[in-house]
Each structure stands twice: as C-alpha cells, then as structure tokens.
Image (cartoon, grey):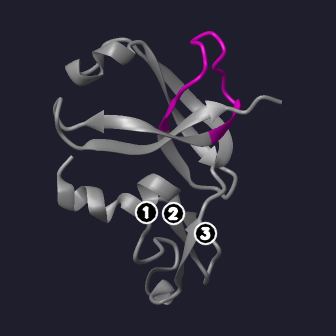
Amino acid sequence: MNMPRFWREKQGRYNLVGNRCTNCGTYYFPKRDICPKCHRKSIGKMEEVRFKGTGKVVSWTIVHDAHPDYKDMRPYIMAIIELEEGPRLTGQIVDCSLDEIHTGMRVRDTFRKLSEDGKDGVIFYGYKFRPVKE
C-alpha cells in the first residue's frame, strides 16, 4: 500500500468511519461523496458516522493458498460482514477456529496488524473481526 492512499484511508481503516445520507438515511462504508440512491439530492447531505463495529457474518471462505506475504497466516478466514447499521464490508475473522465459523455469527471489530512494508518498513494496522462470545 502506498503512503498517500494509506493516509487517505486512515479514518476508515482505524476507526470504521463511513457516512450516512441524511436525505434517505442509508449508511455507507467506505465513505461516498454522493449517495447512489439519491444522486444530486444528497450533495452536501452526507454526514460522517463512526460505526459501532458490531455485526454478523453474511458469507465466508477459508483461504488456503495466499500471497507469500501472508503464508504464515494460512489457512485464514475471510468474511463479508454486515454491520448493525447496514453496510457490508470484507474482513478477516480472527480468534476463531476454522470449524467455529458460521453464517450469522455475531462479530466485533478489533484493531490488528494488517501488513508491513518489508522487514524494516512501515507497519500497517487496521480492523479485523473476532467472534462475540455470548
């Protein structure tokens, strides 16, 4: 990941910040400048929102063959998460064995290391998801 993109995405990546169209009430992640439902009516009506970070697994897969940078993590779980507020996003499921994952599982965001830019480079952090113990 290059530095300009990293800094542009910092709010969303570190804090799960998206936005909501005050015209129709739809939530978005990542942020959008204009609501795809309301189009021009949403200009100037998109408010910033920090999501709670809780949601449920809608779909998931187990990654067995990954990029060499992620070989130590294999196998790992990637899922589509539907946040309580409505938007869906892709995230890795951590602190969960492969046989525990299931559709509908309640999850919560957690702050973790995503990658690093070489052995001596910048370390990138962001959100992943862990099961909610009920």
Give the quarter of the image for residue 71: top left
Amino acid of disc 3 = Thr
Q: What element carries label 1?
A: helix
Q: Is residue 63 above or below residue 37?
A: above
Residue position for label 1: 11
Front residue of 6 and 103? 6
Which one is closest to the eye, mark 1 or mark 3? 1
- Left or right of residue 96: residue 38: left
The magenta segment is: 91-108
- Left or right of residue 74: residue 45: right
Other residues around mark 2 within 10 Å, as few (<14) / some (14–19) / many (≥20): many
Main SS category, magenta section: loop
Q: Where is residue 126 shown, x and y percent of the image?
A: 43, 45
Q: What element carries label 3?
A: loop
Residue position for label 3: 26
Spatial CA distance of label 2 from label 1 is: 6 Å
- Left or right of residue 34: residue 71: left
Amino acid of disc 1 = Gln
